[in-house]
Amino acid sequence: MLQACLGLDFDINEPAITFENPSLPAFLDEVVFRNLAVNGGSADVAVRRSGERVVVDVLDRQGPVRVLTRH
């Protein structure tokens, strides 16, 4: 369910972690992912409610991985 709300997807060819039109359920203001791994790289990511928007912050990144947000 959370993956669908956040539009979370992984692309091993780039490598990239993508959040497509992320949203959070009303009862959840923040979620933090540690060590999201894709094709030799990894990232720690926080997804937070900020007013009416949901923002994605990269906390740490290791190796050749991109974190993308598309609205």
Image (cartoon, rainbow, N blue to C red):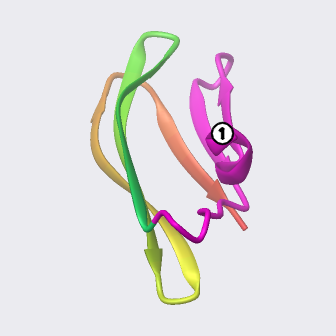
In the rendered image, which quarter contains the C terminus? Answer: bottom right
For the point 62% across and 43% down, which residue is it? 2
Residue lying farthest to the front in this orientation: 27
Q: Identify which amino acid the numbered label 1 is placed on.
A: Gln
Side (left or right) of 25 relative to 42: right
Where, by quadrant of the figure, is residue 34 drawn?
Answer: top left
Where, by quadrant of the figure, is residue 15 drawn?
Answer: top right
Position of 36 relative to 61 (above/below): above
Side (left or right) of 29 relative to 39: left
For the point 63% across and 25% down, which residue is it? 14
**Front position in the image: 15 or 55:** 55
For the point 65% across and 27% down, which residue is it? 10
Residue 40 percent across, percent down from the top left: 43, 10
To which residue does mark 1 refer?
3
Which region of the structure is painted magenta?
1-28
- Secondary structure, mark 1, is helix
Position of 42 relative to 29 (above/below): above
Magenta segment includes 3: yes
Magenta segment includes 53: no
For the point 51% across and 44% down, which residue is it? 67
